[in-house]
Amino acid sequence: MRYCSLGSGSKGNGTLIEQGNTRLLVDCGFSLRSTEQRLRQAGIGGDQLTAILVTHEHSDHIQGVAKLARRFDLPVYLTPGTGYALRQEGLDLRWIDLHSPLLIGDLEVSPVAVPHDAREPCQFVFDNGRERLGVLTDTGSITPWIVEQYARLDALFLEANYDPHMLAYGPYPGFLKARVGGELGHLSNQQAASLLGMIDLEQLQHIAVAHISEKNNRPELARDALTDALAGWSGELLLAEQNQGLPWQTISGLSHHHCAQSGSR
């Protein structure tokens, strides 16, 4: 299994997950032109996509979904709550039940309910039978359910959206500061780090730090906060950026089998 980011942040999000001939695009918050350009940079044509999955209806995640889906005749998987924003004619909408995993091509996709100020938001864990990739952004707080669902992963695409000090003294108006920093907003660097303290890191090969705010955070602050929580961890800490995204990262099955052999699972 491999994954890459087409871009991550408040100006647009899109994450590609590939297993065999199955290629899933999680969210599409860019114009159609920009999306096609970003897909090309990743070496993928829109006609090679299997489906689009949508986490929630905010424009930085959904702006390009309908146009891309229409253009390449793609099914769109989303919760009924999120579907309110995409009730346009001619789309093949497939409802996600937050309590049931989906099988899409070669991947089992488990939707995970998260606290965020949207109608029925979710994030996803992808499983190919050997490796598990977790995608977790746009989450206001870490719940016990999140800890349970993301406990044993081989790779994690994780939001570290803001630094509390920068948010408090930054340019956002009060209501927006309260929204971002609230229980239904985004994860701070420290909240992201706290999740890492609650899950098993042993087979985790990469952590990609995502959805870093351009106004209320700096990549080095996010990296430093997470590094403190990763003492003794031997994996790779990566950055998914707004403009460059993140190039393809391959998850190898080695760590999983190694852990199984050493009896630690």
Image: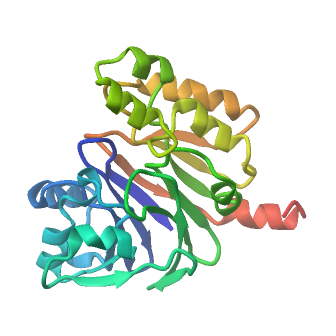
Name which quarter of the figure residue 43 lies in: bottom left
Q: Nearer the viewer, residue 200 or 122?
A: 122
Image position of 228 with respect to 255: above or below: above
The residue lying at 20 percent from left, 60 percent from top is 40
Q: Nearer the viewer, residue 142 or 18?
A: 142
The residue lying at 33 percent from left, 30 percent from top is 175
User: 35 left or right of 203?
Assistant: left
Residue 15 at least partly seen: yes
Residue 160 spot, x, y in % from top left: 49, 37
Image position of 242 with respect to 84: above or below: above
User: 157 left or right of 42?
Assistant: right
User: 166 left or right of 191?
Assistant: left
Image position of 207 with respect to 133: above or below: above
User: 71 left or right of 79?
Assistant: left
Residue 183 spot, x, y in % from top left: 52, 42
Name which quarter of the figure residue 167 lies in: top left
Residue farthest along the right direction in this orientation: 263
The residue lying at 39 percent from left, 55 percent from top is 4
Residue 152 spot, x, y in % from top left: 70, 60
Residue 106 at least partly seen: no
Name which quarter of the figure residue 11 lies in: top left
- Quarter of the figure with the C terminus: bottom right
Q: Nearer the viewer, residue 256 or 103?
A: 103
Image position of 3 with respect to 164: above or below: below
